[in-house]
Image: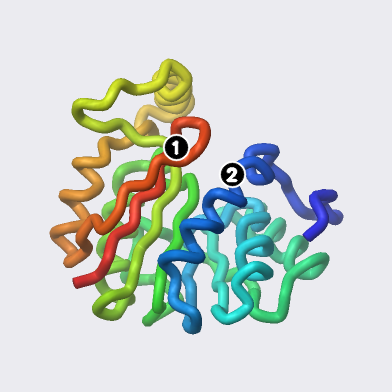
Amino acid sequence: MTDIPPPGARTAPSTARNRGPILEVLKRWLPARGLVLEIASGAGEHAVFNAAALPGVTWQPTDLDEAALGSIAAWRAHAGPPNLLPPVPLDASAPESWPVARADAIVSINMVHISPWAATEGLMTGAGRVLPPGGVLILYGPYLEDGVETAPGNLAFDADLKRRNPAWGLRRVEDVAALAATHGLTLAERIAMPANNLTLVFRRT
């Protein structure tokens, strides 16, 4: 895909830096075939990049924000592969209203910390419902961990998020994993990523 955004599309400089390492994890964990539901696709750059690199899966991007949905549609029209579906609105915090009843895998990049905890609660509820046994939920972003020193940059980012919205902020891996477990999702792998981020892979039991 081209990195020059088409009219109506948004872009995030961090995407070009982190999409390669994220893709390497996806290649290891996603099924060779099936529907991948992306929650909170944002600008849509990850959706286009990942769908192009994983032609065997069907990639369904979603977002709650109308501007994000427009950006995803613009990227898809400009550089989207045939396995990238049109974006659909989805509120992670309202899993009963999700437009997808079943998915073989779920991916969510940089949502958990830039949303209220209710969005993560809804994400786990929805994942527990739509994923088949053995299906995976893959989360990427910065986290806090018990017994692990938090990088100064992540502490500053957490403080900035909470200034912008007191309901936002970096979450503890332990809290996310405990919530996931109540919905039949077991933490299968914790992967250290560049720039003090983590990828958390949960498997549906």
Give the distance between the C-alpha atoms of the residues marked 1 and 2, in whole angstroms: 10 Å
Quadrant of the snapshot with the N terminus? bottom right
Vertical order, 158 against 176 (above or below): above
- Badge 2 crowding class, 10 Å Cα cut-off, few under 14, some 14 to 19, many 20 or more, is some
Labels 1 and 2: the sequence-earlier one = 2
Q: Position of residue 135 (x, y in %)?
A: 32, 74
Compared across the picture, whether 120 is left or right of 151 comes to left
Displayed quadrant of residue 56 = bottom right
Q: Tell me if label 1 and label 2 are in contact, CB under 8 Å.
A: yes
**Residue placed at 32% from the left, 71% from the top?**
96
Decide if residue 124 is in sight here.
yes
Disc assigned to residue 18: 2
Q: Amino acid at mark 2?
A: Asn
Name the residue tied to disc 1: 197
Q: Position of residue 106 (x, y in %)?
A: 41, 66
Disc assigned to residue 129: none
Vertical order, 10 against 125 (above or below): above
Q: Secondary structure at mark 1?
A: strand
Q: Amino acid at mark 1?
A: Asn
Vertical order, 34 against 64 (above or below): below
Displayed quadrant of residue 170 = top left
Q: Secondary structure at mark 2?
A: helix
Vertical order, 92 against 103 (above or below): above
- Badge 1 crowding class, 10 Å Cα cut-off, few under 14, some 14 to 19, many 20 or more, is some
Compared across the picture, whether 135 is left or right of 152 comes to left
Decide if residue 85 is in sight here.
no
Q: Position of residue 155 (x, y in %)?
A: 40, 20
Looking at the picture, the colour scheme in use is rainbow
Compared across the picture, whether 181 is left or right of 154 comes to left
Q: Position of residue 109 (x, y in %)?
A: 49, 51
